[in-house]
């Protein structure tokens, strides 16, 4: 059996390592054992380890994509060589056939007829035909061999591309599954907002502390800071009375860009994730509503808002989260 190529062994080793991390992180339930209940700190420490493996996976994925690109170019060249070989093959076959027809039309039975012809010039014709026939037959054989090699090369490269693509897909799928499971477990540890009554309603709170926000708002803000890698500042208390929750210490803006510009595609996706997370944990944290990208959600779906005239005013550069 042929040895596995280095890239395959490297990828396989990474998958095994990632699988080991996953098994350690997620735990394997056994009969009679209670569900493990790691702390948030423990889960985050495990997530850091996993992210290092994912970083290596991303690097390998990029290298694999590069190798796939090279393989695809190689396959295209091989197929082009195959077409050229077939053209040469057809031309040589035509020329050899022309020699055979010439011998037949001479009425001398081919080379033996020329050899014993009374016309001494027949020997020169015989020698010329023999040389041409030998050259054409050699070219014919060479073209057959080139076609065979080109076909084998194209087939081998196609197989390598399929195998590499499958490896990349499997690694990506496994990484995504492990990461999502870790995130789900972290979401189960989302703290409960303070001041929740037994009937599920929320007791009024006054702003406290140097940041001048309510304790419930602070819990939400800090939970999002721990959960997401925020690219810009978080603004909560604002003195200007605009009829919203900022001057009451009950709202925060999580900026996805600066200077009133549209966020990057990556930060738009991050804003989507933050908004979805806040809605998902609405009842637990005490979220009143979320505004993001000129839409508002009170927990029953997104509703388009009127145009307020700008990127920031329309909340395209920050998810706004208001608390009870």
Image (cartoon, rainbow, N blue to C red):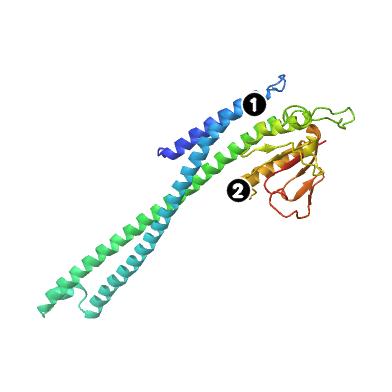
Residue 43 image label: 1
Among the 4 quarters of the image, the one containing residue 99: bottom left
The x, y position of residue 311, in whole percent, is: 68, 51
Which of discs 2 and 1 lies nearer the camera? The answer is 2
For the C terminus, the quadrant is top right
Q: Is residue 81 visible?
A: yes
The x, y position of residue 155, in whole percent, is: 43, 52
- The residue nearer to you, when weighing 292 against 160, is 292
Above or below, 304 against 166 in this view is below
Q: Residue at point 64% right, 26% down?
A: 43
Q: Which residue is mark 2?
A: 264
For label 1, the SS is: helix
Question: Which tag, 2 or 1, sits closer to the chain's start?
Answer: 1
Q: Residue at point 83% right, 27% down?
A: 195
Q: Is residue 162 left or right of residue 277?
A: left
Q: Is residue 227 left or right of residue 246?
A: left
- The residue nearer to you, when weighing 213 against 49, is 213
Residue 231 image label: none
The x, y position of residue 65, in whole percent, is: 48, 46
Whether tag 2 and tag 1 are in contact, CB under 8 A, the answer is no
- The residue nearer to you, when weighing 263 against 58, is 263
Mark 1 residue crowding within 10 angstroms, few (<14) / some (14–19) / many (20+): some
The span from disc 2 to disc 1 (Cα, nearest Å) is 29 Å
Mark 2 residue crowding within 10 angstroms, few (<14) / some (14–19) / many (20+): few
For the N terminus, the quadrant is top left
């Amino acid at each position: 059996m042929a040895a596995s190529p280095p890239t395959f062994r490297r990828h396989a080793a990474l998958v095994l390592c990632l699988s080991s991390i996953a098994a350690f992180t997620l735990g394997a339930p056994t009969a009679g054992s209670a569900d493990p209940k790691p702390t948030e700190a423990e889960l985050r420490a495990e997530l850091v380890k996993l992210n290092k493996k994912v970083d290596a996976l991303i690097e390998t994925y990029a290298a694999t994509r590069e190798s796939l690109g090279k393989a695809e170019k190689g396959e295209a060249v091989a197929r082009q060589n195959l077409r050229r070989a077939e053209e040469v093959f057809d031309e040589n076959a035509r020329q050899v056939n022309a020699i055979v027809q010439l011998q037949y039309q001479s009425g001398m039975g081919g080379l033996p007829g020329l050899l014993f012809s009374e016309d001494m010039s027949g020997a020169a014709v015989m020698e010329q035909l023999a040389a041409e026939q030998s050259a054409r037959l050699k070219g014919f054989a060479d073209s057959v061999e080139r076609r065979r090699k080109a076909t084998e090369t194209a087939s081998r490269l196609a197989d390598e591309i399929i195998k590499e693509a499958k490896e990349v897909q499997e690694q990506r799928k496994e990484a995504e599954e492990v990461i999502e499971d870790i995130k789900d477990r972290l979401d189960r540890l989302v703290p409960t907002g303070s001041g929740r009554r037994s009937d599920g309603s929320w007791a009024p709170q006054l702003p406290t502390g140097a940041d001048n926000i309510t304790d419930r708002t602070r819990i939400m803000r800090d939970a999002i800071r721990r959960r997401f890698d925020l690219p810009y500042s978080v603004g909560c208390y604002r003195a200007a009375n605009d009829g919203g929750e900022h001057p009451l210490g009950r709202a925060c803006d999580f900026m996805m860009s600066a200077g009133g510009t549209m966020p990057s595609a990556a930060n738009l996706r991050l804003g989507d994730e933050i908004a979805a997370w806040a809605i998902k944990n609405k009842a637990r944290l005490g979220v009143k509503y979320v505004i993001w990208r000129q839409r508002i959600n009170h927990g029953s779906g997104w509703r388009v808002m009127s145009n307020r005239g700008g990127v920031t005013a329309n909340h395209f550069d920050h998810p706004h989260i208001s608390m009870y």
